Image: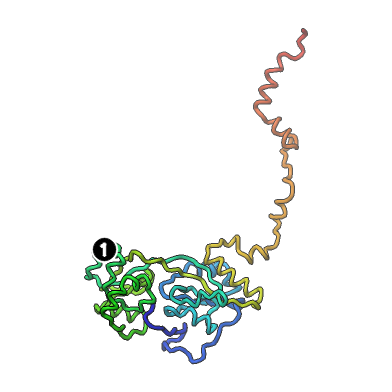
Amino acid sequence: MTPTPETGTPAGEPDGTAPNDPEPVGRPVEGLTVGFVPGVMPGKWFDRWDERFSRTTPLSRFPLESDAGLEALAQERAHMVLARPDHEPDLLDRDRFHSVSLYEEHMVVILPIDHVLTLFDEVPLEELAGEFMLQEPESIPEWATVSHATRAESSRPLPQMRDTADAVELVAAGLGLLIVPMSIARHHHRKDLTYRPVQGFAARTVALVWPREPDRAEEDEAILQEFVGVARGRKSSSSRSATAHREPTEKASNARRPAPVRGQPGRASSASNRGKATSPKNRATKSRRAPTRGKKR
């Protein structure tokens, strides 16, 4: 939820400057690169990938600036990105991208700890109609609707901001408020700020997005689909590559054979006879019949 466009800083650049001509990533099968925007916490998915595929396909983590998922894919600096399509609508272009929704985030308002709205556990959307928001109204259409009359009476230009961090600084200075997903509020946590959920806001989706390439090699597509499975919670036993390439084991082949008869010395070899010979019921029946044998009628 950035007030102004942000430029990404590539991983591994200690001076914080982006190269003029970023080098694109290679084929996924040679090593998978996944970008992720602030607030998204993909650690558990990355750990699962490392456990299953690190030897064959190493994973590179690529932290992105907010709303930089589209740029990372367009510049081929990542094979896939974890992003918020609501913030980057072009990622929803089905002709260009595949997209898998992973989870939803609740929207909150960031405000100073002494703000009157902190009296609410959840702030009604109407209570924010008269507040100045440090972001474009189009980025938060729910608020834009309820604040239309107020903004028409007194328009106020947005201050200069490079990114969400700058907007958070201005909230702390008392210049306005900011509505963002909860994970963003936690990412920019400060002791002099807090946040409250906002009633009347639709949840925002976090999605895994990657380009459509009809001529992509099958082995590259398989790698991408494996990460989709990891992000969606697919177990390693149901891994696509594992099931496709698993060789039949001796145990599996033995499972299709009849179970061997394992008789004990001095006992009948068949399971049915062995059960009759050792059954207490059978022994009791024989003992009861013994006295009557040989009697004449």
Question: Residue drawn at (28%, 71%), measured in percent from left and top?
Answer: 129
Q: Secondary structure at mark 1?
A: loop
Q: Residue furthest bottom?
A: 20
Q: Which residue is mark 1?
A: 120
In front of the other: 194 or 264: 194
- Percent position of residue 247, x then y: 70, 62
Residue 248 picture quarter: bottom right
Question: Residue drawn at (65%, 73%), measured in percent from left and top?
Answer: 219
Q: How many marks?
A: 1
Question: Residue drawn at (45%, 68%), measured in percent from left and top?
Answer: 205
Residue 230 seen in the current view? yes
In front of the other: 222 or 142: 142
Q: Amino acid at mark 1?
A: Phe
Residue 220 picture quarter: bottom right
In front of the other: 193 or 191: 193
Is 163 on the left-hand or right-hand side of 225? left
In front of the other: 289 or 245: 245
Quadrant occupied by the C terminus: top right
Q: Residue furthest top?
A: 297
Q: Is residue 5 above or below residue 255?
A: below
Question: Residue drawn at (59%, 76%), measured in percent from left and top?
Answer: 212
- Percent position of residue 137, x then y: 35, 77
Is 69 on the left-hand or right-hand side of 156? right
Q: Is residue 203 above or below residue 74?
A: above
Is 50 on the left-hand or right-hand side of 254? left
Quadrant occupied by the N terminus: bottom left
- Give neighbour class at mark 1: few <14, some 14-19, many 20+ (Cα, 10 Å): few
Residue 237 picture quarter: bottom right
- Percent position of residue 262, x then y: 72, 42
Residue 191 seen in the current view? no
